[in-house]
Image (tube, helix red, strand yellow):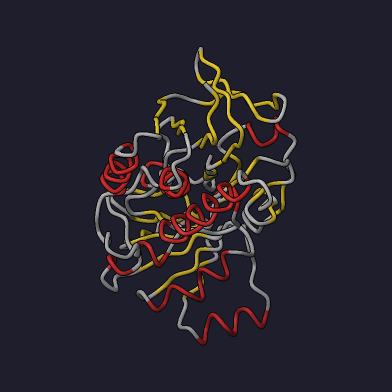
Amino acid sequence: MTFDALIVGGSFAGLSAALQLARARRRIAVVDAGQRRNRFVDASHGFLGQDGRAPGDIVADAKAQLLAYPCASWHDGLAIAARRRGEGFEVDVGGNTLFTRRLVLATGVADELPAVEGLAERWGQTVFHCPYCHGYELDQGAIGVLASSPLSMHHALMLPDWGPTTFFLNGAFEPDAAQSQALAARGVAVEATPIARIRDALTVELVDGRRLPLAGLFTATRTRMASPLAEQLGCEFEQGPAGPYLRRTMMETTVPGVFACGDAAMAFANVAISVGDGAMTGAAVHRSLIPGLQ
């Protein structure tokens, strides 16, 4: 069987793209390994109509709604390789090879955290990257920003709207005079002493022995592609502030017939943005399948 479109990645962007194609009565398949980027968090926020729900529950409902369309199918597993085959593509999933006319990469990115003891264990629980997703629930408690690059300055200036903020430089960033003035104007405390470790639910222990309890800690991660497929296919990348993302025009990558959506294709995203991006990508894939509309 050759599918009209194969979507690699069954999270928010991929499901949204798949739904548009299923509603266009195209034969589609979703391949998913169950590694959503936000799998570490208990609740998703800021997504209209779904605020506060567990992200896994949102995805489960979306999957059930998609599979109610008889032209849609689901394949659990990791897509390990992809290549062009004639006018279409073939994708290896476990011991099977799937064939498709169009390929959608909704493969996402993986976060690389600063090397601070105790940080990774608290990722998605008390350590976050998105104030809009998690800031409100901190109930205006003490907030920390862990510097990882100059991008952290953006975090430090935003977060006082959610609570009193301390900017931990940790040897990763040094604000200049103008930046220091901007931080002072926002009431941000700047802590230059390096962090030794993160303790308990969320206590920052500094190398001089001081301990600062926080309601939440934010840091800007580096990101990398979570899947090798785009590189295997020869897709080109843009370099964003946090890491690479796929270059595309009208949702199509630089490889004709390969489309992309979600975190793999945008410098910054959240659930709501990824769903919208997926919907636009699904519509673009559908148009590409219609003679005269490419």
- Residue farthest front in this picture: 292
User: Against 226, is 17 above or below?
Assistant: below
- Whether residue 83 sits left or right of residue 93 in the image: it is right
User: Against 264, is 209 above or below?
Assistant: below
Camera-nearest residue between 31 and 136: 31
- Whether residue 97 sits left or right of residue 24 in the image: it is right
Among the 4 quarters of the image, the one containing residue 56:
top left
Camera-nearest residue between 170 and 261: 261
- Whether residue 143 sits left or right of residue 168 in the image: it is left
- Whether residue 25 sits left or right of residue 92 in the image: it is left
Residue at position x 45%, y 34% from top?
Answer: 30
Residue at position x 55%, y 65% from top?
Answer: 192
Residue at position x 43%, y 73% from top?
Answer: 159
- Residue farthest top in this picture: 95
User: Against 165, is 26 above or below?
Assistant: above
Position in image of residue 177 (x %, y %) = 67, 81
Position in image of residue 75 (x %, y %) = 42, 26
Camera-nearest residue between 60 and 143: 60
